[in-house]
Each structure stands twice: as C-alpha cells, then as structure tokens.
Amino acid sequence: MTDPVAEAPADQTHSPETATLTEETPRPGGLAAALWDFDGTLADTEPIWIAAEYELIPRLGGEWNDHHAHQLVGNDLIDSGTYIAQVIGRDDLSPAWIVEQLLQQVVEYCRTNPIPWRPGAVELLESLRATGIPCALVSASYRELLDVIIGRLPEGSFVTSVAGDEVTRGKPDPEPYLLACEKLGVRPQDCVVLEDSPPGSRSGHDAGATVVVIENFVPVPELPNQIRVQSLEELDATSLTELVARSAGGRAHDRVDTPEIDRRGADAF
C-alpha cells in the first residue's frame, strides 16, 4: 500500500495493561475516564483500511468505490464483512474470512510503518495521564491490531481496552463502552467518549456518556449530550474536563439508569 501518513512518534513497545479503578480513585474535575475510539479518532487509520479494501475486493472479482468504503467507517467488522460480500455478490465468502484478509493487511502495515496519530491525540493522552484521568481504548478493530497500537504508545497511555472481537454486539450498540466502564469501575455518565463516526457516537451516547465528536471521514449526526471540536489539538485534560462539565450541566452527578451488558457474550472475556 502507499503510505498515506506522516511520521509518528518513536515506538515504546510494552504489554497492554488492564486495571480496575475503585470508587476511591481520585478523579480530577469529576471526569471519571476518557474512552477513546481508535480508527479515525486516535489514529488516521481509515485510509489504511480503505487501501486494504481496494486491494482485496478486485481479487475477489468485485468492484469498489469510496461511497461503499465510507459505509464501513466505525462499523462492527463482521457487519463490514457482510456488507462487502453483499456488494460484490460473493455469498460464498464468510464475513469473518473477509475481515481476516483485511485485518492482516492493516496489522502488517501498523507493525512496519509509522502510526498516523491524529493531530493532538498523543498530546491529549499524555495530558490526561499526567492529570490522573484514566483512558480506555474502545474499538471495533480486533485485539491483534489493538495490541500493536497500544505497544506503539508511551507506557501507561491506556489503563484498559476493549476490542471488537471481545463483545457480543459492536458499535453502534452501547456494549463496547459499557464494558470499558465496567473494567474501569466507573459510571458511563461520569465519562467522556471521543469519537469520529456515526456508529461510535451512537454507541457512546446510548451508553450514557458525553460524546466529543471530531469528524474525520464521514459526517456525524447530532445527538444530545454531544460536543463538537475541529481537532484534538484544541484540547488538554483541563479544557476537556471543563467542556464536559459545561455540556453536562450537572448531569454527570445526577442519578441515571445505565444500560446493562448482555453477559452471555461479555463474560467470556
């Protein structure tokens, strides 16, 4: 594939950590955690996925275009595989097999090339870490890819993560963000979700969090309790906390009902 990205920070490979915060953990400014989407929010990897689609689909006898590619942005990967099979008329191919072909291309790219971090993303992560606000990575991408990405970030950038192959229902269902909150030991309504896609924005909203939208490849419909910024470069831990507090208008500390995870699938992880 042609390299669509700019130089990224040097690697600091490490094993991803999973930890649970207790109710006694200090939470500066009342913000319990920041929950990050990966593709298109933390890193500009959508062009890598799209390049993989354009490479694979002609080999399967199909035709592809940007309209179809943009339909997949932010979606559960199996849903994307199903969409591709339907568009190219290959009902003989399983969605999981299609996903695996694309995933291996993207994983190999991310292992061997600089990661295209979104402007301001690494700096905001460091600001949140330094302030004591825990971050979770919550992605439709699979564990194999997330482990590569987490290993390319400074140690401690993410306290925990949720991959697309670790949930029963992916975005736009709220399950991924609810599972991240469960791992962190926090309430969704006390968290902020950082997202760039319609499915991800809906997932964070339906989980009960305030959603900060940073549009990238596709327009994102407006929803309640949503904040929009042009770039993560506008934010640090302090300004993000203040934005969420102003948007919530005290909602973060009101009693609200939180959706429950379907434990039939989540218990396995």
Image (cartoon, grey):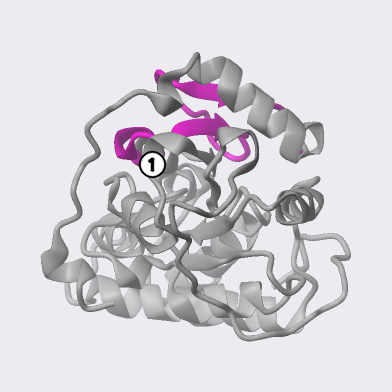
Q: Amino acid at mark 1?
A: Pro
Task: Give SS at disc 1.
Answer: helix
In the rendered image, residue 87 lying in the magenta stretch gets the answer no
Q: Residue at x 67, y 79 (%)?
A: 151
Q: Position of residue 260 (x, y in %)?
A: 18, 48
Where does the C terminus fall, quadrant-wise?
Answer: bottom left
- In the image, is residue 107 above or below residue 36? below
Q: Residue at x 37, y 43 (%)?
A: 187
Q: Residue at x 44, y 68 (%)?
A: 57
The residue range painted magenta reads 203-232
Where does the N terminus fall, quadrant-wise?
Answer: bottom right
Q: Residue at x 62, y 34 (%)?
A: 214
Residue matched to label 1: 188
Q: Position of residue 119 (x, y in %)?
A: 80, 46
Taking the image as shown, residue 126 lies to the left or right of residue 143, namely right
Q: Position of residue 66 (x, y in %)?
A: 53, 46
Q: Nearer the viewer, residue 133 or 7?
A: 133
Taking the image as shown, residue 116 lies to the left or right of residue 57, namely right
Q: Position of residue 29 (x, y in %)?
A: 63, 33
Residue 138 seen from this side:
yes
